[in-house]
Amino acid sequence: MPSPQSRREFFANVVLGTAAALGLGALAERMLAFLYPVVAPEQSVEYPVAAAEAVPKNGGLVAHSPAGHVALEDDNGTLRAFSAVCTHLGCIIRWQPGQGHVWFCPCHHGTYDRAGRVVSGPPPRPLDPLPVTVRDGMVYVTLRVRPPTTLPDETPS
Amino acid sequence: MVPGWLGQRIPISIEALRRPLREELPVHLRFWLFWLGGTPLLLFGVQVATGILLTFYYVPNPAHAYDSVRQITLVTRFGWLIRGMHHTASQLMFVAVLLHMIRVFVTRAYRAPRELTWVLGVVLFLVTLGFGFTGYSLVYDQLSYWATTVGTNLIGSLPVLGRPALWMLRGGPDVNPNTLSRFYDFHIGVLPTLFVAVIVLHLLLVRLHGVARLQSDTRKETYDFFPDHVLREAAIGLVVLLALVVATMVKPPELGPPANPDITPAHIRPEWYFFPPYHWLKMVPMHVGIVTSGLFVVAMVLWPWVDEGLERVAPGKHLGMVLGIAGWLFTLVLLVLEALS
């Protein structure tokens, strides 16, 4: 039969157990932190996305820039811009007029009207509107972008 | 003891090695429907073998992934066969796992004290889904890219932990080059490790409890695990391997156009085993779809206790069976609706 644990042994085991739990917990936290990506904070940047004449009268198109996809539409001479990313699960919408809608998402068949409002399907909210201006025949849209992370000059030693 | 030099290095008796082979199985196991548990394990072995071969040529980088798959398919000796077997075995794996689950469900083999065996089985099914999802994302054609986008966004829309989980999974806020290498890591490292660990526990519990007897079968006879049952499993294994090779030759896996992050294709949908949640998400608002899909998975995991609770509420009414069959049928209807859409 094992000898009963003394008070000294009991406290030593408690201290060792606590230290082990804290040490392993800290290690696990750092392992999770290692997996969490390092990303730069968002900035607002104005991008030229299309020639103004490329947007059809009373029509729309999806333009692409390195900073994102933009849905442009002309509504009787008024130019509007939205993020072309469907608010449901992130597919790229397309100009495809139908019953009450003009924008269509091919993934889960969500539809939006000219104001970017949801007409049918599962999208939970309207398209995200984007500030848009026309200068020198080009359409400029302000997008929220994250600049790529840059490597520092020094090497680990 | 094991004789000679080896016996001195591995001090174990031959009797201890023979004991696991001597298990006596109830005779209902002679019917082929009850051999389906071994098939997913065999197919997992095929996946490991063909998967290791594929890693010799596959390059998990967005700039080269698609072309490396083309090279495997079109240039590498028997590349079409190895890739085809890997793809087809993944499809058959879902069929085998689902048939095994349906068999266990119908015979209510999950009842006490085997609840944890069922729970581990459901975990294996979910890991298999993870294999499917990460696997076809690696091909980096249009289906791959957009399935990755939609699937990961689905995780991102979960409350509280959704966003951090999304960033960790993708290696950033958007689908980016890190995403492919992370999916590759999951596919060839994390998920196989998890699968092996869980299947060891699953099989250990099956052996510790012994095979559940059928409620409707009062026969007391048994037969030997070895060689009788092992030969039966081997026979069905050979049929599965033959079916696998023939299916690969008759319908080799397709390779769509390369991934284009600018254009979501007009007709896009995931592999057939994701049809039910995919169609469900088309039918209902997003948060309803996510919450109900989550509840469905929770109900699957907790099914032995749900069934037991229902039996206690209405003894002899078989409410659990009715509810369970309704769930299976509903899933099947969603699958068929998406297949026909």
Image (cartoon, rainbow, N blue to C red):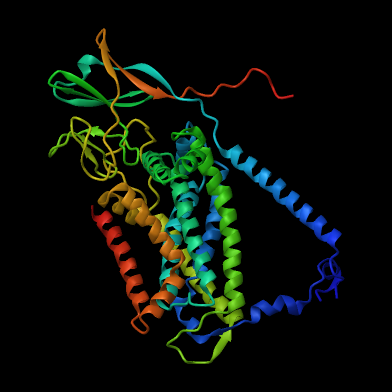
User: What residue is drawn where x is 14% and y is 21%?
Assistant: A57
In the displayed structure image, the side of residue B196 where residue B89 appears, left or right = left
User: What residue is drawn where x is 48% and y is 31%?
Assistant: B63
In terms of depth relative to the viewer, which is nearer, B106 or B246? B106
Residue A155's image quarter?
A: top right
Answer whether residue B278 is visible to the viewer in this image.
Answer: no
Q: How many marks?
A: 0
> Whole-percent x and y of residue B336?
27, 59
Q: Is residue B176 above or below residue B310?
A: above
In the displayed structure image, the side of residue B1 where residue B72 appears, left or right = left
User: What residue is drawn where x is 24% and y is 33%?
Assistant: A94
> Whole-percent x and y of residue B6?
82, 67
In terms of depth relative to the viewer, which is nearer, B232 or B134? B134
In the displayed structure image, the side of residue B329 where residue B252 appears, left or right = right
Residue B91's image quarter?
A: bottom left
Q: Looking at this rendering, what residue extends furthest in the top direction?
A: A136
Answer whether residue A113 is visible to the viewer in this image.
Answer: yes
> Whole-percent x and y of residue B79?
49, 47
Quadrant of the image for the N terminus of chain B? Answer: bottom right
> Whole-percent x and y of residue B188?
56, 48
Q: Is residue B316 above or below residue B304?
A: below
